[in-house]
Amino acid sequence: MGLMIAFIFRVVINALALAAAAWIIPGITVSAAPSSDQTLGTVLAYLVVGLVFGLVNAVVRPIVSLLSMPITCLTLGLFTLVINAGMLMLTSWLTQYLPMGLNVDTFFWDAILGALIISIISALMGWMTPSKR
């Protein structure tokens, strides 16, 4: 039960971080889910995109991080930002097949800055939440 609540909480944190990035950066947009209520469609779209982003970070990112370990060490960890931007672009590509989705215009500025914003907000929100240790 506790694991399921932690998973749902993580999806909500991802959705809020994606919403902040979409609000700040004009090149990142999230299209609303088809619904009679616009607010419900928008919230549902952010939750679905947050779920896909969480799954991409849980499945693909560890593999990419392991394979890029030499360049990450060479750049003193700055390449992690490029990996995060790649995960954001992968989420954008995957959600284009859904009725709602994430759209990132360009990799260099939009995805890099969006990944930076999402990383900062996710870290702050994860830091502020209590953990069971």
Image: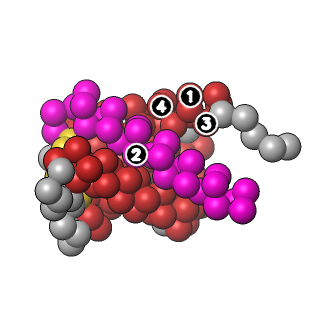
Judged from this view, the residue extending furthest toward the right is 133
Judged from this view, the residue extending furthest toward the bottom is 97
Pointer 2 or 3: first along the chain = 2
Q: Secondary structure at mark 4?
A: helix
Pointer 2 or 1: first along the chain = 2
Q: Which residues are magenta?
A: 1-27
Pointer 4 or 2: first along the chain = 2
- Residue 64 spot, x, y in % from top left: 50, 62
- Is the residue under label 1 in contact with that under label 2 (CB below 8 Å)? no
- Residue 38 spot, x, y in % from top left: 16, 47
Q: Viewed as shown, does residue 78 lie left or right of 3?
A: left
Return the residue nearer the eye: 20 or 108. Answer: 20
Q: Residues within 10 Å of mark 2 (few under 14, many from 20)?
A: many
Between the residue at mark 2 and the residue at mark 1, the CA separation in whole angstroms equals 14 Å
Return the residue nearer the eye: 5 or 84. Answer: 5
Q: Residue tagged by mark 2?
A: 15
- Is the residue under label 3 in contact with that under label 1 (CB below 8 Å)? yes
Q: Residues within 10 Å of mark 4 (few under 14, many from 20)?
A: some
Q: Residue tagged by mark 1?
A: 124
Between the residue at mark 1 and the residue at mark 3, the CA separation in whole angstroms equals 5 Å
Q: The residue under label 4 is which amino acid type? A: Ile
Return the residue nearer the eye: 4 or 115. Answer: 4
Q: The residue under label 2 is which amino acid type? A: Ala
Q: Secondary structure at mark 2?
A: helix
Q: Residues within 10 Å of mark 3 (few under 14, many from 20)?
A: some
Q: Residue tagged by mark 3?
A: 126
Q: Residue at x 18, y 67 (%)?
A: 99
Q: Residue at x 48, y 57 (%)?
A: 54
Q: Residue at x 59, y 57 (%)?
A: 7
- Residue 3 spot, x, y in % from top left: 70, 59
